[in-house]
């Protein structure tokens, strides 16, 4: 249905769709819904089990395992191949069931934030604009679109005012594209998405408003067709987080897991040829060693990684959804939440309630003047009427409430709704006298003054007056008007020049009740909170103080230069931070960098945290102009926040960047990421969409505009900002467990492989048979699943917990070598203490001794190397304790069982167990000492 009518005039389109400008009747809509089906995308249908399992094969580890299994089968090593393929199958099934459980528990909560659309329908009570769930839209429906709305279907515009839409989810282009209800559209050189009169499902309204007719819904939309052509491609485009035309940037989690995975995969692929070559060169062995070489490579693989990751994240997300009404739309975002060390927040509607109430209406001299409020309300009324906005925005609503009937005494001629880039809204009304029009402009103080006929001195005086009002936390609107001779054609931007300044309207917007507590909790968790807002700097600084935050720097977005040397320069200029750990001199006098590491954005007690300043314009017209900034109020050492049990953490000051356009917010977020931070962004408005996409984790409150909710990775379904603190903790919980798994598994695996390679070269026989290596691996994998249910220690929850590949690789190398030394020491001790015994001569005894020792050391490592948990915490064993005990029991008992005999294992002499106990005790002490040393050095 979409292609034919799309090209026609408005009337042709309406006729083709058998509808009219006043929309469908209820009965027609119901009949069409039955025929066309619900307006949902194929993606939202639950994928089949087979598809979920097949997806598991895309994981690099599983894929490598599969290749190793096939190699084993190719050389007819059927046992090895069977065990490896069983591992692959188990991994895929466990992962699929984890995903399934996560989807199920979140589906119910998603309903809470499901989208609605404003539709014109004719029912028994006549025609009315009403909100319906987007799933109920049908072709032929006439809908209204306003700023922040998601385009709910493919539509043809019938009327529009100042409409621009974000099409990033469809085209990757971050800049909003202008659209208009052209009567006779020609073909666009930029393809269908360039057509000015068409808007597509998946895009969001950045500015302006429109009335449009629905052309296609559900799978028949362009986005739906993309899913049919390939769900992966479609998902990729929808998940595009680039904030630009560049390919989507990987999130912190993707980067970390990718980094670690690829190092390991290289090792795994190198292992078999190395083992073969070493065996051939030193022992004259041939291709018969291949199954052993493959088994060693498998031994190195953390094949349960995808399962553990999915289970940890899915469990965390499900608990978060159930207990705190937080919906994690993209599972890896939970890990990123745990790693967030900087949270940027917009102010209005997030920290404040966005329920403004008019306080005063004052003229240019600062005296009360009700006329200013009246003109502002005239503008609000006619914007609402003429732009056919689905609903007034909060400031306009407050104006209309305060001014009563204002507006209706005039006749509206035209309106351009509020635009967060221009920071203005304009309406044109007929009158006051015959033959005249009045242009009414209201908006941010600087934006309005830029268009007024004022002298520079007068402008500075008005800016200072505005700043004085704002310092008490009030929001401000400036109002200006101009009379022009009436003329039929549309007004142009020139009509917004040479305005007569009328005055200001001030508003009080109360703080969100949970904001102060949320900010305190975040600070206590080591997360630095910074505010990026479109509002006035003085208003924001006051809000910041009311929340108990210390506004360290207050900057104006337009003062941040547009550096050519990349995003990191923005961070250096705004925050005084360079790449993590490097102090960079800030932009203004008296600015010193605070060089927080990724874990210390807020808890940074490193050098430089104590020299910050609050800035104002050099001429005393605080926050007014673009003059060089100077420090006026040095802020002392970082303040401290109690974190319980008498402990306190230092908290660095909050940086405020005011007068941000949507792009400025995204630029600052990208800058912080480029400087090595993991950045969350919490925002609710259409002006937050680019930043939500640019952040590692975008977070939107429940009553955010639809476009913000759609762009966010995490939605707070309850009206309680403290849920962010819980979400951060849940993220750290999950990442702590994933990190523990990786540390324990990788260091043990590496140790085993090194020891096995060394023993393989020293001994006349293989140190272990391939089947024994694989069974040992299987036992270990099964025990590791307990990590998904472990409770990390309090230390792991206290600060940001990212997986940092370098630190990881350092850790596993050190502890891997220690593990290999323990393995080799066991056999040195055996050889020395049991002279003449068969331990190092008899292959089955050697294999059994090695098998038992390996499982016992692995059990020990599980207990001693998990994140943040010390034996001294003296808790009950928990799932991990039981699992480690089980592993140790298998290590001791399996060689005695018939299965052990089948695997070529045998009972060990009693003296071996005595010696083994001694070696294990020494190994445990060495592990504890090494861990303590490591933590002292690397934190
Ligand atoms: N409906 C409106 N009409 C005219 N001017 C407006 C309107 N809404 C906001 N403004 C002005 O534009 C400024 C910037 O608004 P914008 O929406 O970009 O940010 P904000 O809502 O103030 O803050 P935040 O970015 O924290 O949400 C406001 O401070 C106000 O002066």
Image: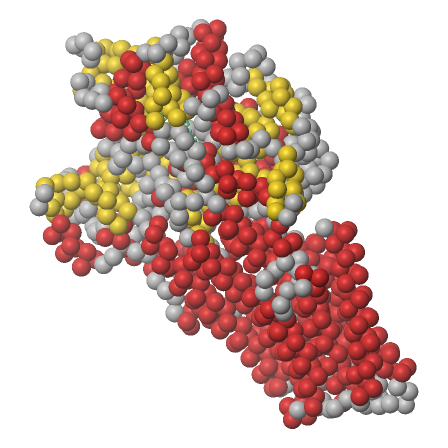
Q: Position of residue 568 (x, y in %)?
A: 62, 37
**Scheme of image coloration:** secondary structure
Q: How many marks?
A: 0
Q: Can residue 164 be seen here?
A: no
Quarter-of-image position of residue 932: bottom right
Residue found farthest to the front? 646
In what quadrant does ligand 1 lie?
Answer: top left
| Residue drawn at point x = 88 percent, y = 86 percent | 834
Quarter-of-image position of residue 733: bottom right
Q: Position of residue 263 (x, y in %)?
A: 67, 61
| Residue drawn at point x = 83 percent, y = 80 percent | 915
Q: Tell me: residue 188, above or below residue 778.
A: above
Q: Tell me: residue 89, above or below residue 818.
A: below
Asked whether, in this view, residue 463 is left or right of residue 824, the answer is left
Q: Can residue 609 be seen here?
A: yes
Q: Tell me: residue 8, above or below residue 890.
A: above
Q: Nearer the viewer, residue 329 or 22?
A: 329
| Residue drawn at point x = 22 percent, y = 28 percent | 385
| Residue drawn at point x = 56 percent, y = 13 percent | 620
Asked whether, in this view, residue 387 is left or right of residue 125, the answer is right
Asked whether, in this view, residue 159 is left or right of residue 513, the answer is left
Q: Position of residue 278 (x, y in %)?
A: 79, 75
Q: Nearer the viewer, residue 410 or 387?
A: 410
Q: Position of residue 843 (x, y in %)?
A: 78, 88
Q: Tell me: residue 25, above or below residue 185.
A: below
């Amino acid at each position: 249905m979409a292609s034919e009518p799309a090209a026609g005039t408005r009337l042709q389109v309406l006729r083709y769709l058998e509808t009219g400008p006043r929309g469908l009747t209820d009965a027609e809509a119901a009949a069409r819904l039955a025929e066309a089906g619900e307006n949902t995308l194929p993606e939202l249908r639950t994928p089949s089990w087979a598809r979920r399992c097949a997806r598991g094969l895309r994981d690099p580890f599983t894929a490598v395992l599969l290749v190793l299994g096939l190699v084993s089968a190719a050389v007819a090593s059927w046992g090895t191949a069977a065990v490896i393929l069983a591992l692959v199958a188990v991994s895929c099934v466990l992962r699929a069931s984890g995903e399934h459980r996560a989807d199920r528990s979140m589906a119910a909560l998603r309903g809470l934030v499901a989208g609605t659309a404003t539709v014109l329908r004719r029912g028994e009570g006549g025609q009315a604009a009403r909100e319906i769930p987007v799933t109920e839209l049908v072709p032929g429906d006439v809908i209204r679109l306003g700023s922040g709305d998601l385009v709910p279907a493919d539509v043809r515009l019938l009327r529009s005012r100042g409409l621009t839409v974000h099409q990033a989810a469809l085209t990757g282009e971050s800049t909003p594209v202008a659209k208009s209800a052209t009567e006779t559209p020609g073909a666009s050189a930029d393809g269908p998405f360039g057509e000015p009169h068409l808007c597509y499902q998946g895009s969001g309204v950045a500015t302006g408003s429109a009335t449009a007719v629905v052309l296609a819904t559900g799978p028949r939309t362009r986005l739906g067709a993309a899913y049919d052509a390939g769900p992966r491609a479609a998902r990729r485009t929808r998940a595009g987080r680039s904030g630009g035309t560049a390919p989507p940037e990987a999130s912190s989690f993707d980067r970390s897991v990718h980094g670690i995975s690829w190092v390991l995969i290289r090792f795994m692929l190198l292992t078999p040829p190395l083992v073969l070559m070493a065996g051939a060169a030193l022992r004259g062995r041939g291709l018969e060693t291949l199954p052993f070489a493959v088994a060693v490579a498998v031994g190195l693989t953390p094949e349960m990684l995808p399962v553990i990751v999915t289970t940890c994240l899915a469990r965390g997300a499900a608990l978060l959804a159930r207990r705190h009404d937080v919906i994690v739309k993209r599972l890896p975002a939970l890990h990123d939440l745990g790693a967030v060390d900087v949270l940027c927040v917009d102010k209005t509607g997030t920290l404040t309630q966005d329920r403004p109430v008019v306080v005063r209406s004052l003229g240019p001299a600062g005296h009360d003047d009700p006329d200013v409020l009246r003109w502002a309300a005239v503008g609000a009324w006619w914007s609402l009427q003429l732009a056919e906005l689905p609903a007034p925005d909060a400031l306009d609503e407050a104006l209309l409430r305060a001014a009563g009937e204002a507006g209706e005494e005039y006749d509206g001629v035209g309106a351009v709704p509020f635009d967060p880039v221009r920071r203005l809204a304009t309406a044109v009304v007929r009158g006051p006298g015959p033959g005249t029009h009045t242009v009414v402009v209201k908006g941010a103080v600087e934006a309005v003054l830029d268009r007024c006929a004022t002298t520079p001195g007068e402008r500075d005086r008005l800016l200072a007056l505005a700043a004085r009002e704002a310092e008490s936390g009030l929001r401000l609107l400036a109002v200006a008007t101009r009379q022009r001779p009436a003329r039929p054609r549309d007004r142009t931007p020139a009509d917004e020049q040479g305005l007569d300044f009328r005055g200001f309207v001030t508003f009080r917007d109360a703080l969100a009740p949970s904001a102060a507590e949320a900010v305190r909790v975040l600070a206590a968790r080591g997360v630095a909170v910074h505010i990026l807002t479109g509002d006035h700097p003085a208003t924001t600084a006051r809000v910041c103080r009311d929340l108990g935050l210390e506004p360290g720097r207050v900057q104006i977005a337009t003062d941040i230069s547009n550096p050519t040397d990349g995003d990191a320069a923005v961070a250096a200029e705004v925050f005084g931070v360079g790449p993590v750990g490097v102090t960079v001199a800030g932009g203004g006098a008296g600015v010193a960098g605070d060089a927080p590491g990724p874990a210390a954005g807020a808890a940074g007690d490193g050098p430089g945290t104590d020299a910050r300043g609050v800035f104002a314009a050099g001429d005393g017209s605080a926050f007014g102009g673009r003059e060089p900034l100077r420090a006026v109020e040095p802020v002392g050492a970082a303040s401290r926040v109690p974190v319980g049990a008498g402990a306190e953490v230092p908290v660095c000051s909050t940086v405020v960047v005011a007068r941000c356009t949507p792009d400025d917010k995204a630029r600052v977020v990208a800058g912080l990421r480029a400087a090595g931070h993991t950045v969350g962004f919490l925002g609710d408005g259409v002006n937050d969409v680019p930043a939500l996409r640019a952040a590692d984790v975008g977070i939107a409150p429940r009553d955010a505009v639809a476009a913000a909710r759609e762009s966010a990775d995490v939605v707070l379904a309850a009206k309680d900002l403290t849920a962010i603190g819980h979400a951060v903790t849940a993220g750290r919980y999950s990442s702590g467990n994933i990190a523990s798994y990786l540390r324990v598994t990788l260091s043990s695996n590496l140790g085993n492989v090194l020891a096995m390679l060394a023993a393989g070269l020293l001994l006349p026989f293989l140190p272990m048979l391939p089947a024994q290596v694989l069974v040992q691996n299987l036992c270990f994998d099964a025990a590791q699943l307990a990590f998904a249910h472990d409770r990390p220690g309090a230390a792991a929850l206290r600060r940001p917990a990212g997986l940092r590949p370098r630190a990881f690789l350092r850790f596993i190398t050190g502890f891997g070598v220690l593990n290999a030394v323990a393995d080799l020491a066991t056999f040195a001790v055996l050889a020395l203490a049991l002279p003449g015994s068969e331990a190092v001569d008899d292959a089955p005894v050697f294999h059994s001794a090695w098998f038992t020792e390996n499982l016992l050391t692995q059990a020990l490592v599980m207990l001693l190397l998990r994140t943040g948990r010390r034996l001294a915490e003296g808790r009950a064993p928990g799932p991990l304790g039981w699992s480690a005990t089980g592993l140790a029991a298998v290590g001791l008992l399996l060689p005695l069982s018939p299965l052990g005999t089948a695997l070529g294992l045998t009972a060990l002499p009693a003296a071996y167990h005595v010696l083994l106990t001694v070696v294990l005790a020494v190994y445990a002490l060495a592990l504890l000492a090494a861990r303590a040393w490591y933590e002292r050095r690397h934190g």
